[in-house]
Image: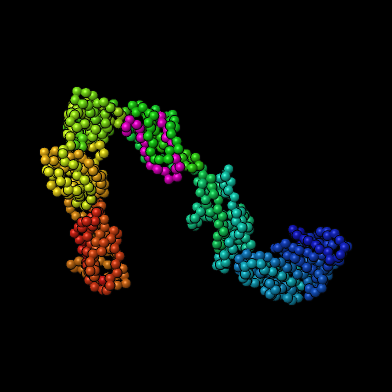
Amino acid sequence: MISARSTTVTGAARSTTATAVVLAAAGGLLTAVAAATPASAATVTCASPVYKRQLFANTTFSGTPKKTDCDTAVAENWGARAPATGLPKDNFGVRWTVTRDFGSGGPFALTVAAQDGIRVYLDGKVKVDLWKNVTTIQKKTVNLTIPSGKHTLRVDYANWNGNANVNFAYTPRTSATVDKVKPLAPTAPTVTYDKATGKAKLTWAKNKEMDLSGYKIYRALNGTKFGSTPLATTTAATTTYTDSTIPKTGQTYAYEIRAHDKAGNQSTGSTDVTATTVDKTAPVQVTGVKVTVAASTLRLDWNAVADAFSYSVYRASAPQGPYTRISWAIGDTYYTDSTENIKQRAYYRVTAVDKYSNESVPSATVDPGEPDTTAPDQVTGLTAEGTTAGNAVRWQASSADVERYEVWAAPAGGSDPDGPEIALGTSFNDQLAEAGVPVTYTIQAIDAYGNISPVSEAVTATRPAPGESAAPTGLTGTLRDSATVLTWDFSTDAHYGYRVYRRTGTNDAWTRISADKVTATLYDDRTAPIGRASYYVVALDQYGNESAPEGVVTVTRETPATSTAPLPPTITLSAPYTECTANDCVAHGGADTPLTATLTPTSDRLIWGYEYKFTSDTGYTTTTNSTLTWTAPRSGFYILQVRTVDYYGGRKGPASTISFKVG
């Protein structure tokens, strides 16, 4: 019996008159029958992989077929009956033809069983030939490789007499030892991203391989490599996948689809498709939050968060809250809370916010502790000295928690007319003091909470009027490794020489650093500190009085002045070279093998660089690099000498020496 099969049939009448095409069931098959037209007037088209079947009233397939229809398989058992109405039960032929896309192709088995004759063709070439009249079923299997792409299979069957039956199948051979052909890469991939759900839907075209097992989907951050483990797998019949796990970070992700067959062969990847996600991922929690009290305000500092666009600060009066946001859209990693009464304990939390307004969980709670209500100790050791630059006021440091000092200056017997000056260190220069007018000074220390110490004992100083000598001109400061060198122009009325003063803070008292009388127009400050320092020079008139302090010069040192040259570096040779010792000096490398010497400073002292010399060099070479690359001109014994050049370049230390042998 012949079972009914689905089919696609189109008919086109060769007659010039319009005719109707009807579908009639014949032997379980759909047959195109043109009404009122000859049987040969209809053209049948069958959709691949359905066969086009043609039935002939002869075994030579000559003339017009008596019937043409579509058949899903070559599997018939007519016995001693005719295959269709209008055909004989003996001496008839049937031809099945199909053209299909085999994808990447591969090894196939052609299996036949027929009574009587059968021939199988691939692209017009005979692959199976059992063309003879038999009384029993003859069988055969042929293994062959079908190339990639579209190919045509044709099956010719002939029944001369007796029982008629025929079976044919073409099946892929899926053993991993036989099939080494990869599927073709999937085509036409697309991805659609749903911003509302945060899901990405992929689709692609179905592969043509008959032995396809399924598809593997890979995902990676765009611009990075795909991993070896797929995101998901689907069956061969499924060509869509919805990714519900794609991170919602605002980043772009790439997808790739790979086909795999039953033998385990995997295709190359499809063309990548990308989806840009919405960012619904909050930044990580802010860490390192600390709060300090300064200038009667509370300052918060924290560590930066990588994807933070801004930060928000929350405050509460109790550790458990409730917390109120007091500031937002903070672009820095600090915040000063000047609205809070620092005498009232407060608690803080900080959050990070990204550019999509996703906010992190709050940081750990921080607070400055119980407010300090204890005043600093009274300032002691107060002194005041009048100079032509102003009155130099100095004192000893008060309590450890002092933030600043208030310097009160009042005329003798009066009060400070404009309030105190602020000093951050333990000295102050009152440059506003009038010459010849005694000024009384007192100091009070203030901590971060605004607690004020008792008033210090008072001292008095009088600023002297400048002497008759003019202030020296042309003062310059030159940075050297051993000193800051000060030079100035010769003054004809510097009868008793010069004095040199220095300070490091903008309001600090000036300190005389020179001897009482300097007769030269040059002075080396061998105790010059790191950082900013200002200098002035005065001339002494015939009475020993100082001139006015004009022509202040300020310099900034990266290193303090030092009396010793820098130590030599440690030298390390690159392989295969080794340092010669008393018991071992074997040659290594050669003239074609460069040597790299690594120079490691022996301290954290800032330096300019190095000077080095190999045995073959005529002099030292300077460099700022910590590695030297050198190629020996020939084999032999060599010595490398390296010495450190101080930061300002004017002083060189002793040399390190290392010897080695080149093969």
Viewer-proximal residue among 136 and 47: 47
Q: Is 649 located above or below residue 305 in the figure?
A: below
Q: Residue furthest top?
A: 413
Q: Position of residue 76 (x, y in %)?
A: 75, 65
Q: Position of residue 313 (x, y in %)?
A: 42, 35
Viewer-proximal residue among 30 and 141: 30
| Residue at x 53%, y 45% (from the top left corner) | 278
| Residue at x 39%, y 27% (from the top left corner) | 317
Residue 616: quarter of image: bottom left
Taking the magenta stretch, the answer to whether it contains residue 306 is yes
Viewer-proximal residue among 520 and 4: 520
| Residue at x 51%, y 46% (from the top left corner) | 250
Viewer-proximal residue among 50 and 150: 150
Taking the magenta stretch, the answer to whether it contains residue 249 is no
Q: Position of residue 622 (x, y in %)?
A: 26, 61
Residue 438: quarter of image: top left
| Residue at x 33%, y 34% (from the top left corner) | 292
Query: In the rendered view, does 73 fall on the left or right side of 647?
Result: right
Q: Is 593 located above or below residue 216 in the figure?
A: below
Span highlighted in magenta in the image: 294-316
Colour setup of the view:
rainbow
Q: Quarter of the image containing the C terminus?
A: bottom left
Q: Quarter of the image containing the N terminus?
A: bottom right
Q: Position of residue 253 (x, y in %)?
A: 52, 52
Q: Is 241 located above or below residue 163 in the figure?
A: above
Query: In the rendered view, does 204 fall on the left or right side of 589?
Result: right
Query: In the rendered view, does 449 fall on the left or right side of 68?
Result: left
Q: Is residue 663 at all visible to an observer of this figure?
A: no
Q: Is residue 314 at all visible to an observer of this figure?
A: yes
